[in-house]
Amino acid sequence: MTQFIVAGYPAYAYTGGRSFDPALPAIFFIHGAAFDHTVWQWQSRYFAHHGYSVLAVDLPGHGRSPGVLRTSIEAMADWVAAFIEAAGLPAAAVAGHSMGSLVALETARRHPDCVSRLALVGTAMPMAVGAGFMAAARDNAPEGFDMEAVWGHSRGAVLAASPVPGTYLLGSSRHLNERSRPGVLHADLAACDAYRVPAEALKALAVPTLVIAGRQDQMTPFKAGRDAAAAIPGARLVTLDAGHSMMSEAPRAVLAALRDFLPPK
Amino acid sequence: MAHLGPRTPHPDTLAVHAGQSPDPATGARAVPVYQTASFVFPDTDTAAALFNMETPGHVYSRLSNPTVAVLEERLAALEGGVGAIATASGQAALHLAIVTLMGQGGHIVASASLYGGSHNLLAYTLPRFGIHTTFVPARDIAAWRSAIRAETRLLFGESVGNPSVDVLDIPAIASVAEENRIPFLVDGTVTTPILGKPLAQGAHLVMHSATKFLSGHGVVIAGALVDGGRFDWAASGKFPTLTEPYEGFHGMIFAEESTTGAFLLRARREGLRDFGACMAPMTAFQVLQGVETLPLRMARHIGSTHVVADFLAAHAAVERVYHPHLPSHPDHALAQRLYPRGCSAILAFELKGGRAAGQRFIEALTLFSHLANIGDAKSLVIHPASTTHFRMDDAALAAAGISPGTVRLSIGLEHPDDLLEDLGRALRASQK
């Protein structure tokens, strides 16, 4: 396991089961609120074994990364840029899910030289968070994790067969959230809720962009993803028949969309 | 402040639907039996990706199978876990849990009140492979704590033991497990997720003999192992099988690969692959048929058991009845706290007249079948001292709460009046 130091603290990245090699084209994966790198389990392992260097990170204060919790999307974006630099990469393709999609976008805005391609999965701008969800998260109430698990999947997923044999997707997702430190879910949701990006800033984005939107998404509705794609010049929209947690609900389709989008290695 | 969470399906709904979508190939509504050993790879890249866990899917039915996966996901949903592995038997589930967590030199602390087969595995067979168990009285929480050694890797007990129907204080033992950063495995066979969820009560892992109430009809041998996804393997520092590279799978570090699913990944990628005690698709189908009616059946099993317990407790030929439904049982209060809907369709009692009366009783029964099983649709009877627990001497029997005259009943789905008629007649015959 390669050890990274970012902004003075150890920072964890899963490298897909291969040693990190900065000479290869790099993909940087960013998880959503109160999650960790394992939401990108399938995609990161695949790319790491197909000629890419993968950094699926745990944001500071999440999973295996200690360090100070970043409470704004902008601060998270600065950390991502610092990570890319610390890893010795000139730039990376940056893919983010949910909150991570905002972090990826903001990294491309603030540090355009760091981001060679941008993939936004399950995104919305703005990403408003309902008062009930926010209150449950503030109180570290189990209902907050229920909301993230249930709304974080398609309506049918609570009963459907999982693409990952023997894994109950809602249970996995909920227990992963529940392992986050107290206060992390609330801080992350508050960061999402507060983040705003002006339309002109989206228009000014010069980076090749992919938006993956789920028709069954209950957290960031399909329309929000479609609007985001329309607002970014030249952005490609890929529509999946899946809910918000599309990396596990539709792992092969997400992989195919990313594979088509990334430059040939 | 109270929060209103999203509505999630009730256990009754999960029991019928969880883990299954109408078959994408044919539209079949019932779970199809995918009676196949292998699965065709669409292309060479996908084949390699499947083998290397870069993409999820089925390769070979020893590792996973679509019919078996429906059962696994349904049980995980019912138990509130992250996933499950279905096994060839309950014994295979227990073995898989143990060998995933430890090797030679490992140590287990287990309740002394265990199913005879589990006791055999822990007391006689595993020591041959360097894994040793200390048995403690289930109710003595201090004994659980003091039996833990540096090499202890698992605490194990049955939610409800038999035949004396003792109730495991899961929350109390779970605290001991948390203090020592050791996982706690509960055999939930007797209670099923319908009566109580060990994971919600603090256990980390749950296993079942699905032969019993889950399948419910006495037609299959089957088991399952469910992971709650809550145990922090990395923080514990005691589980190199999950936190250090595994030579047997390209140096994979399971706890990095999946934060919540590390245990099941290793169990599937090593234990199921190499020991091979997988479940057959037809078996999974039959267990699923049972699980669909589990909530209905458990209500009936429990209702009739309480009727029988009251009847026996008032009968002149009966010395003593063991069931937590009765205020005389030492676990009455605990059972009411952990299992408000009832905890066991198994009960035991002692006849007046000892061993000979017991034999006359069993032979006079007509509805109850004399056999070694529990959790059938049909009512069952057995004399533990001469069958399931025959290897134990009187002292060991006493430790497990059994006397030479103890008779164990598993109450089925017949009309309770007919059960009482059969029992009443046999009780009279026993005293002649």
Image: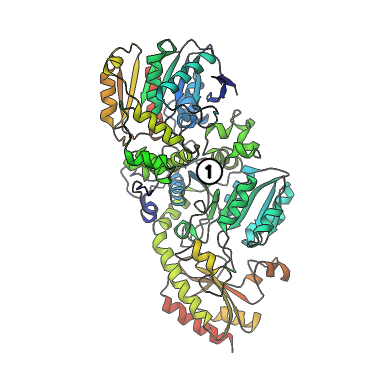
Residue B393 visible: no
Q: How is the model colour-coded?
A: rainbow
Q: Residue B140: x, y in percent?
A: 66, 61
Q: Is residue B20 above or below residue B163?
A: above
Residue at the outermost bottom position: B432
Q: Is residue A47 above or below residue B17?
A: above
Give me the residue at 50% from left, 84% from top: B425
Give me the residue at 58% from left, 60% from top: B168
The chain to which mark 1 is attached is B
Relative placement, left or right, of A209 versus A223 is right
Within the image, what quadrant is residue B113 found in? bottom right
Q: Which residue was labeled with disc 1?
A: B230
Q: Residue A208: x, y in percent?
A: 35, 14
Give me the residue at 56% from left, 63% from top: B167
Relative placement, left or right, of A83 versus A104 is right
Residue A220 visible: yes
Give me the residue at 39% from left, 21% from top: A258
Q: Is residue B347 above or below residue B280?
A: below
Q: Quadrant of the N terminus of chain A?
A: top right
Q: Residue B117: x, y in percent?
A: 63, 59
User: Under tag 1, what secondary structure?
Assistant: loop
Within the image, what quadrant is residue A122 found in? top left
Q: Quadrant of the C terminus of chain A?
A: top left
- The count of marks equals 1
Q: Is residue A54 above or below residue B148?
A: above
Q: Amino acid at mark 1?
A: Arg
Q: Of residues B303 and A82, which is closer to you in this image?
A: A82
Q: Residue B2: x, y in percent?
A: 37, 49
Relative placement, left or right, of A192 versus A50 is left
